[in-house]
Image (cartoon, helix red, strand yellow):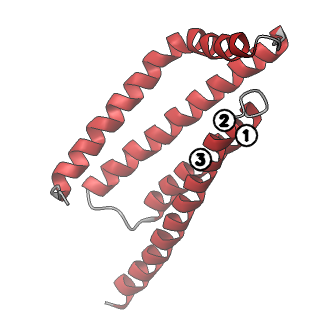
Amino acid sequence: MLKIPSKASIVISTILSVLFLSGCLIGVFFLPQATNALIDAKYIVNGYEYITPQNRMVIHSLSYVVLADVVVADILLFFLLIRVKSGEVFTKKSVALIRGVSWCCIILGLVFAVIGLYFYISFIVAFAALFLGICIRVVKNVIEQATEIKQENDLTV
């Protein structure tokens, strides 16, 4: 398997994080059209269903919540990458950043569960986001425990 050096991996991850954030910020302007296209595609295919203007507004609002949540998670990951680059991994601040990302994933899962009431496929995304949030939470617990052990060792030396 291809192994990328640690420094290069951090640089690549940082660049991807910035590009993703840029894409999200540009996406803000296209979100209404994209959401309308998805709504129309679903209901044109099914034909007999009709979506009320209130439901359309709910779906638009939820899509903005999803985008905002993703932007927050990406910013937290960016700051975490900066801490990793500077060698500050096992600190309370890094644990807090990981905790924030896990909560963003869990919130994303809950929002997609609500969207699933309109688009059943969203339940799959909700399940994946919740599972990812749980996995990140487990990693957070491991890093938090390692941070405590490191602090104890720093005090004994």
Query: According to the image, label 3 marks what residue?
Result: 129
Q: Position of residue 72 (x, y in %)?
A: 52, 37
Give the SS element for disc 2: helix
Q: Position of residue 139 (x, y in %)?
A: 49, 66
Query: According to the image, label 2 marks what residue?
Result: 122
Q: Position of residue 7 (x, y in %)?
A: 17, 54
Instruction: Give the image quarter of residue 138.
Output: bottom right
Q: Is residue 38 above or below residue 13?
A: above
Q: Position of residue 135 (x, y in %)?
A: 54, 61
Kindly identify the amino acid type of the residue bearing the numbered disc 1. Ala
From mark 1 to mark 2, how far is it between C-alphas? 7 Å
Indicate which label's residue lies in the foreground, 2 or 3.
2
Q: Residue at horizontal 45%, vertical 39%?
A: 74
Residue count near mark 1 (Cα–Cα under 10 Å), binned few <14, some 14–19, many ≥20: many
Which mark is first along the chain, 3 or 2?
Answer: 2
Query: According to the image, label 1 marks what residue?
Result: 113
Kindly identify the amino acid type of the residue bearing the numbered disc 2. Ser
Which of 21 and 92 lies nearest the eye of the viewer? Answer: 21
Q: Residue at horizontal 81%, vertical 8%?
A: 53
Which mark is first along the chain, 2 or 1?
Answer: 1
Is the C terminus in the top left, top right, bottom left or bottom right quadrant? Answer: bottom left
